């Protein structure tokens, strides 16, 4: 598996071939609190870089989920729809959101690596 | 205006509170365990809530005060026993609600617990209505701590011996280290519990004792999910100046004795609405599936007829499903009426349901 990259909207993305797996970061779940609802994009639909591709709701509020890259939705994670608390438990592992067939691999270039993201998330929460 | 802090602020910080501003106060929204665990802990064990931001209004006076307050509140205060509490409202002439409150008859007069965001305005209104004839003190030297949940009685009794004998919606003065605490058996979570009025200087020490006995601090986030599961109204959401107690389905809180004769502020409107009905009424709503419909979500009958609006909506941790309250046109307020909720541009099915969502566990008649 390739290096994991991160967006300013607190999504993570990992690439295998031209299929990207996308989820939200641990830092995002800590800011959101207990997640109780998630809505994912439809399989087969196309999503655009930085466009909305779902919703997460915590006990407190609703937030949009953005996709850090463009592509066609190949798969979505039904397990987190059925039990959204899994997102708080393992956000950067089993609780991935959706898989995309990427259109343009150069879109990854603008994203952060884990060191950069760690610094970014610390600054944005202080 | 600078954000105010309660006397428990340091305690909150030491317990990793996340703070929000609420009604001009820096208040804990949650602690490290999060809203769902805090909610469940309260239902199972005993949760401590800092509600010191709420108003504690002492009004001193005798029989004349009772007579004057009956001109304001829709309560039978003459027959209210000393140390007994009632839920009520401060209304305008149109029965619009300025605030909802708990009023307790005490030896020296009355103690009224007011919402934080409303307390200053309430004080002005009540001062005017009472014409400056009675001593009124909106306390700022006292904290208010709520202890809620099934284990609260044993925990509090081990600190303040004798509270187990209190019935729900009664209170009394209790001595604690040479000072007087006013303790009521009451709360706003649907659980058995207590509210303790204590001088600021002693509040932290006292609250720490409750923690040492096994109770845990709970934030405003869980307070909201708890009260919503219990079907209880929150001012600024279910209740405001444009809604009446009858529309809010709170007729039960108006003393029967007062419904026949009126004579309180807003009584004409109340009687008219009881006779002629209201166009809208507060209901409980269960969205199908896991969808959460927040405040201001539009409610539809069929696909294009708007019949109302959600006033509070969240996920109910103890019943493990989304819940909401709102107002709908009366003809669509029957239990099991199928409705639609418009969320993010799409309409989702939901049903009108009975309140509360979670059965209340008040302890009545212990002596």
Image (spheres, helix red, strand yellow):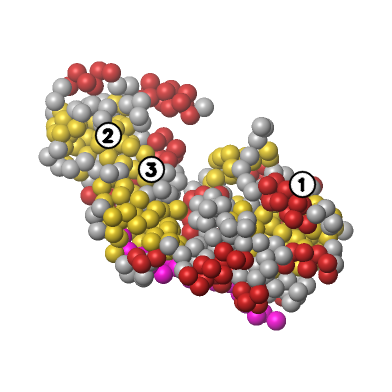
Segment colored magenta: B350-367
Which of the numbered marks, if any, corresponds to residue A62? 3
Identify the residue under disc 1.
B140
Instruction: Say above or below: B82 vs B298.
Output: below
> Looking at the rendering, in which quadrant would you find the N terminus of chain B?
top right
Q: CA distance from mark 2 to mark 1?
A: 47 Å
In-front residue for pair B174/A13: B174
Residue A112 at x, y = what percent? 33, 21
Calculate the distance from the C-alpha at mark 2 to the C-alpha at mark 3: 13 Å
Do residues under tags 2 and 3 come within 8 Å of each other at their CB atoms?
A: no
Point out residue B166 in the picture as x, y percentages from the top left corner: 71, 73
Instruction: Judge if badges 3 and 1 mark residues of a common chain.
Output: no
At mark 2, the secondary structure is: strand
- For label 1, the SS is loop
Horizontal arrangement in the rendering, residue B243 relative to residue A102 (left or right): right
Residue A56 appears in the figure? yes
- The residue pinned by badge 2 equals A52
Q: Is residue B225 magenta?
A: no
Q: Residue at x 58, y 58 (%)?
A: B94
Q: CA distance from mark 3 to mark 1?
A: 36 Å
Q: Chain of mark 1?
A: B
Q: Main secondary structure of the magenta part?
A: loop
């Amino acid at each position: 598996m390739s290096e994991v990259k991160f967006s300013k909207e607190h999504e993570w993305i990992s690439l295998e071939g031209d299929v990207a797996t996308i989820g939200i970061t641990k830092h995002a779940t800590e800011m959101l609190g207990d997640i109780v609802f998630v809505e994912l994009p439809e399989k087969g639909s196309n999503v655009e870089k930085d466009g909305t591709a779902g919703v997460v709701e915590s006990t407190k509020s609703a937030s949009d989920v953005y996709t850090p890259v463009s592509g066609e939705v190949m798969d979505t994670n039904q397990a987190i729809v059925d039990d959204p608390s899994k997102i708080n438990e393992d956000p950067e592992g089993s609780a991935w959101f959706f898989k995309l067939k990427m259109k343009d691999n150069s879109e990854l270039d603008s994203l952060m690596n884990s060191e950069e993201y760690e610094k970014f998330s610390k600054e944005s929460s202080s | 205006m600078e954000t105010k802090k309660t006397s428990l602020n340091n305690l909150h910080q030491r317990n990793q509170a996340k703070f929000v501003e609420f009604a001009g106060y820096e208040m804990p929204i949650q602690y490290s365990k999060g809203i769902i665990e805090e909610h469940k802990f309260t239902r199972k064990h005993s949760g401590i809530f800092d509600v010191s931001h709420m108003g504690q209004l002492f009004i001193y006076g005798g029989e004349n005060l009772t007579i004057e307050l009956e001109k304001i509140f829709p309560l039978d205060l003459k027959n209210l026993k000393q140390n007994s509490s009632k839920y009520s409202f401060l209304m305008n002439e149109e029965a619009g609600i300025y605030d909802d409150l708990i009023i307790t008859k005490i030896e020296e007069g009355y103690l009224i617990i007011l919402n934080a965001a409303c307390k200053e305005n309430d004080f002005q209104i009540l001062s005017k209505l009472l014409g400056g004839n009675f001593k009124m003190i909106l306390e700022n030297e006292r904290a208010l701590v709520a202890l809620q949940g099934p284990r609260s009685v044993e925990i509090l009794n081990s600190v303040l011996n004798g509270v187990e004998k209190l019935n729900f919606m009664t209170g009394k003065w209790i001595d604690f280290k040479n000072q007087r605490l006013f303790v009521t058996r009451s709360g706003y979570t649907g659980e058995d519990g207590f509210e303790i009025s204590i001088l600021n200087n002693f509040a932290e020490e006292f609250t720490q004792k409750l923690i040492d006995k096994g109770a845990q601090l709970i934030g405003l986030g869980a307070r909201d999910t708890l009260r919503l599961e219990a079907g209880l109204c929150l001012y600024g959401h279910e209740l405001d100046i444009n809604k009446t107690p009858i529309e809010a389905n709170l007729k039960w809180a108006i003393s029967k004795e007062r419904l026949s004769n009126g004579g309180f502020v807003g009584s004409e409107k109340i009687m008219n609405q009881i006779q002629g009905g209201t166009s809208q009424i507060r209901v409980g709503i269960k969205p199908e599936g896991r969808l959460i419909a927040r405040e201001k979500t539009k409610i539809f009958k069929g696909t294009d007829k708007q019949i109302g609006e959600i006033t509070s909506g969240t996920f109910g941790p103890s019943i493990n499903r989304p819940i909401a309250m709102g107002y709908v046109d009366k003809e669509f307020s029957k239990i099991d009426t199928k409705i639609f909720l418009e969320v993010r541009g799409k309409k989702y099915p939901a049903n009108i349901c009975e309140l509360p969502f979670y059965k209340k566990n008040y302890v009545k008649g212990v002596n």
